[in-house]
Structures are given as C-alpha cells and as structure tokens.
Amino acid sequence: MNKYDAISLKSRWSDSLNELGQSVLSGKGSSPFPSTSEGYADLRGLVIRRFIRGATIASVDLSGALFEGFGQFGSCAIKDSRFRNSYLRSNLGNSFSDCDFGGANLAGAVLRGVFSRCDFSLADLSSSMGSQVRFLGCTFFRANFRKAIFLRCTFEDCHFEECKFGNGSFAHSKFIRSVLPEESLGNTLIDKVQWM
C-alpha cells in the first residue's frame, strides 16, 4: 500500500461509517466492508478519533489508518493486526503481538507495554518515546529512530538492520540477543545500556 492507496481508503469512510468502524474497535459490531483477501476485518483507512480503552482487537487490517484528535489505544490487547502505512502519532499501549507496523508513521508516539513479534520495517519512530517498554522478537529494518527516547526498555531477540539513529537515547535499556551495531548509533545516548 502506498500513500495514494491510503488516501483512497480514507475517502470510503463517511462520518456514519467512521463511527461504526470506531465502534468495531471497541468490540461492538463488525466492519461495514467485506474481509480482506487475507481474512482480516477491513478497517483500512479508518480515522480513529476516540480513545479506545481496554479493547481486545484481533485480525484487523488498519493499514492507512489515522489517529486524529483524541484517537489512541490505551490498555488494549491487539494481536495479528496490520497498521501498514498508518499515521499513529499518539499513544499506543498496552499489548501488541504479531502486528505489522511496516511503513507506519509513529513519529512522536508514546509506546507502552509489550510488543511481541511485531514488524517495524520502514517505520518512522523518530521523536517517539517509551519507558520500560518490552520489545520481544521484533524486526526493525530501516526503521527511523532519530530523536527517539526509549528509557529502561528491553529489546529481546530483536533484529535491527540499516536503521537510522541520532540525538536520541536508549539509556538504561537492555539488549538481549539483539545486535545493535554501536557504530551506527551516532550520538544516541547509550548510558548504562546492558548488552546481553
């Protein structure tokens, strides 16, 4: 999906359909569109304006989605869902497993909780932040970590390749079986980082 596809997907959501789509995320109703060819509930291009709290969300395609206004996920459990090329510059928490954030714009987002087996390839994590977040078995291929601040976080069995770093911090974090080439970190603060 490219940016033009995302714009096209957003245009299919009238105000009433958008309200319905946000209700689906809160566990009420079903998508107004047929499932994707991969079997995901189709909420692609949805504009999320609500604070979605405490929801359990599974097998939903939110590619091209946008957080707007109060839109955010708080204390949610989200699994096997897609956020490709989404614009999620808000709060993301609390549990994400087997999710695809490929190409997502998470610049300035606040991440909380646990991210297990998530793919952040080509994601923009610049100026994002998190404290005591756990990343387990995640992939970061060409992800942008410039000005990102992740304090006291754990990166276990994560894969970093061709990522961009600088002016950020991983202070007091743990990297367990996660290779992060120190020479690529530039001036990223790695004070009291544990390499295990």
Image (cartoon, rainbow, N blue to C red):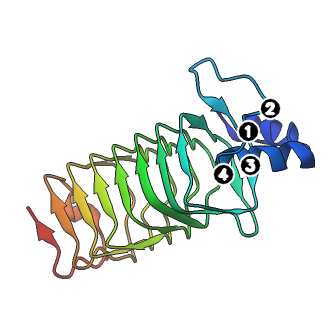
Residue 77: in sight, yes or no? yes
- Identified by mark 3, the residue type is Ser
Crowd class of label 3 (few under 14; some 14 to 19; many from 20; radius 10 Å): some
Query: Relative to residue 93, is residue 154 drawn left or right?
Result: left
- Identified by mark 4, the residue type is Ser
Could you tell me if the residues under marks 1 and 3 are in contact, i.e. CB atoms within 8 Å?
yes
Residue labelled with disc 4: 26
Task: Name which residue lies at 12% across and 71% down.
Answer: 194
Compared to 42, does 37 lie above or below?
above
Could you tell me if the residues under marks 2 and 1 are in contact, i.e. CB atoms within 8 Å?
no
Residue 143: in sight, yes or no? no
In terms of sequence position, does the residue under pointer 4 or pointer 2 come before the other?
A: 4
Residue labelled with disc 3: 23
Element under disc 2: loop
Element under disc 4: loop
Query: Residue 29's x, y, as percent?
Result: 73, 39
Q: CA distance from mark 4 to mark 3?
A: 5 Å
- Identified by mark 2, the residue type is Pro
Single out the residue that lies furthest toward the left: 196
Compared to 181, does 102 lie above or below?
above
Could you tell me if the residues under marks 4 and 2 are in contact, i.e. CB atoms within 8 Å?
no
Identify the mark at residue 29; answer none if there is no mark.
1
> Of tags 4 and 2, which is closer to the observer?
4
Residue labelled with disc 2: 32
105, 116: nearer the viewer: 116
Crowd class of label 4 (few under 14; some 14 to 19; many from 20; radius 10 Å): some
22, 127: nearer the viewer: 22
Element under disc 3: helix
Query: Relative to residue 57, is residue 152 drawn left or right?
Result: left
Q: CA distance from mark 1 to mark 4?
A: 9 Å
